Amino acid sequence: MSIMKRKQRHIRVSLEENVESDIPTGFGDVSLVHRAIPEIDLKDVDASTELFGKKLSAPLIISAITGGTEEAEKINKTLATVAGRLGIGIGVGSQRIAIQQPEVERTFRVVRSAAPKALVIGNIGCPQLSLGWGIKEARKAVEMVDADALAIHMNPLQEAVQVGGDTNFKGIVKKIKALTADLGVPVVMKETGAGISFEDARRLEGAGAAGFEISGLGGTSWSAVEHHIAHEVGDGQMEYLGKVLWNWGIPTACSLVEVRSASKGKVIASGGLRNGLDAAKALALGADAVGIAKPFLQKAIKGEEDLEKYIETIIAEIRICLFLSGAKNLSEINKVPVVVTGWSAEWLKARGFDPAHYATRGR
Ligand SMILES: Cc1cc2nc3c(=O)[nH]c(=O)nc-3n(C[C@H](O)[C@H](O)[C@H](O)COP(=O)(O)O)c2cc1C
């Protein structure tokens, strides 16, 4: 199947089929402690921040979605226009297609022209590094959108259950090390729906990664997407595998604690975040910003107005949650007490982290 056809299918399948994980993000196990006397005026709550050298009005990123087709160009234009207007960040979808077929570069470049001042994150994948890509292609991806940072997506689950997937992830850390040394913009190691462990975050930070995008389990499942695509192309074995591994991964809230504990770098929490309450919980657990993909795609298809309203609502929710937690800004939400219970607490304890540490801090 051509990459262009695959891109079209990703959008259509994500919009029309059930591709959500059945296992939750873990944020349902996370509570911020209510402050009856926040001693703040909600009007004074400041959710702005800075990430990779750019100011954000709120700690929100449109996670990598698309590029490469006419439809993708339209979607990217809508996403970028709204991101620019509201002062949030935007990641482009995998730029592999434009590096191989320069005639579709415009479907990515539209992001920078629609949002000249926004934080823009470029995107290439580990499978391409395995197939021989290096600094030249990474520079091209950065130049194409004048990227402030480059995400390198890690999608071993998707590749393993994809008809004709590229499953060679050998020697990736060494390749990342070579890239981070020479690229000149920060490299963000990004999962795509199965999360990042403490161990991998440590190794990647050692290889020079400046940040991570969690994309944990709990939202869009790429095993589910590939399950549907395998069904359409009549590959029964991959269809079956995609179903079995539908819920594979580290739930987002747990992965966030793992990565935050492993790294001093920037952390974008994503994977199943759907509102400002989840976002505020992620910020309290140490995320520098949060990313959302599928819901933004669903709104962008309807138009700028729907997308803008949704993003404004999320930002309002984040500000209210900060207020109710007694935090005036993002550096304060990082220090408020957070209670982690249930399955997520069990996970964290089993992995050697102490959930009680979050519950009593700031006393
Ligand atoms: C249609 C679609 C296309 C995507 N394409 C990419 C991509 O090219 N590169 C990438 O790193 N992630 C890609 N993602 C993954 C998202 O950036 C995100 O990590 C994942 O969907 C989990 O977030 P969500 O639950 O908010 O959707 C894509 C997601 C969707 C829905």
Image (tube, rainbow, N blue to C red):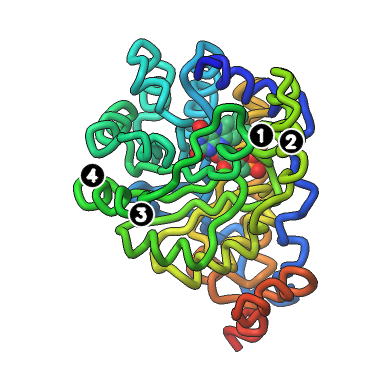
Look at 64% across and 58% down and name the residue there: 250
Q: Nearer the viewer, mark 3 or mark 2?
A: 3
Asked whether 235 or 318 is in front, the reply is 235
Q: For the residue with label 1, is its CB less than 8 Å from the closest atom of ligand 1?
A: no
Q: CA distance from mark 3 to mark 4?
A: 15 Å
Callout 2 secondary element:
loop
Judged left or right of residue 338, residue 285 is left
The picture places residue 61, in percent across and down from the top left corner, at: 51, 43
Image quadrant in which you'd find residue 28 = bottom right
Q: Is residue 291 visible?
A: yes
Q: CA distance from mark 3 to mark 2?
A: 30 Å
Whether residue 221 is situated above or below residue 354 in the rendered picture: above
Q: For the residue with label 2, is its CB less than 8 Å from the closest atom of ligand 1?
A: yes
Q: Residues within 10 Å of mark 2 (few under 14, many from 20)?
A: many
Please report whichever mark, 1 or 2, sits nearer to the chain's N-terminal start. 2
Name the residue tied to disc 3. Answer: 173
The picture places residue 16, in percent across and down from the top left corner, at: 76, 24
Whether residue 79 is situated above or below residue 245 in the rendered picture: above
Q: Residues within 10 Å of mark 1 (few under 14, many from 20)?
A: few
Q: Residues within 10 Å of mark 3 (few under 14, many from 20)?
A: some
Amino acid at circle 2: Val
Please report whichever mark, 2 or 4, sits nearer to the chain's N-terminal start. 2
Q: Is residue 308 visible?
A: no
Look at 69% across and 18% down and name the residue there: 233
Name the residue tied to disc 4. Answer: 183
Callout 1 secondary element:
helix
Quarter occupied by the N terminus: top right
The picture places residue 3, in percent across and down from the top left corner, at: 50, 19
Amino acid at circle 1: Lys
Name the residue tied to disc 1. Answer: 309
Look at 71% across and 56% down and name the residue there: 25
